Image (cartoon, rainbow, N blue to C red):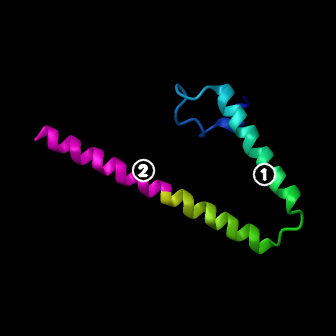
Amino acid sequence: MDQERTRGRRPFPRIVSDEALEHAWNAREEFRKSVASLLPSLPPEFTKHRQAARKEMLLAVRSLIDSAIERVEKNEAKRVE
């Protein structure tokens, strides 16, 4: 896989193979193309709201991860005491 495309996108390099990552990336691109072909004349507002919704979903996942990290750290602190 092209190093430029994958730079910063490999949080688990030993778990997810390059081949699996390439297939996932290609599937994502093909899905985007299929949606674009179904809705060829999307209004700019739709795209703007879709991007905002995507960001909000990512922020939601981030908050779940942060919460999980906090729980792990609290449990580790309790074990040390």
Residue 59 vs 19, above or below: the answer is below
Type of residue at label 1?
A: Arg
Q: Is residue 63 left or right of residue 34?
A: left
- In this orientation, which residue lies closer to the viewer: 77 or 61? 61
Magenta-colored segment: predominant secondary structure: helix
Say which residue label 1 marks.
Answer: 32
Q: Residues within 10 Å of mark 1 (few under 14, many from 20)?
A: few
Disc tally is 2
Q: Position of residue 81 (x, y in %)?
A: 10, 41
Residue 76 falls in which quadrant of the image? top left
Say which residue label 2 marks.
Answer: 65
Q: Position of residue 63 (x, y in %)?
A: 43, 57
Residue lying furthest left:
81
- Cα gap from disc 1 to disc 2, whole angstroms: 27 Å
State the residue at coordinates (86%, 59%). 38
Label 2's element?
helix
Looking at the rendered image, the quarter that the N terminus falls into is: top right
State the residue at coordinates (62%, 65%). 53
Residue 3 in magenta stretch: no
Extent of the magenta region: 61-81
State the residue at coordinates (77%, 45%). 29
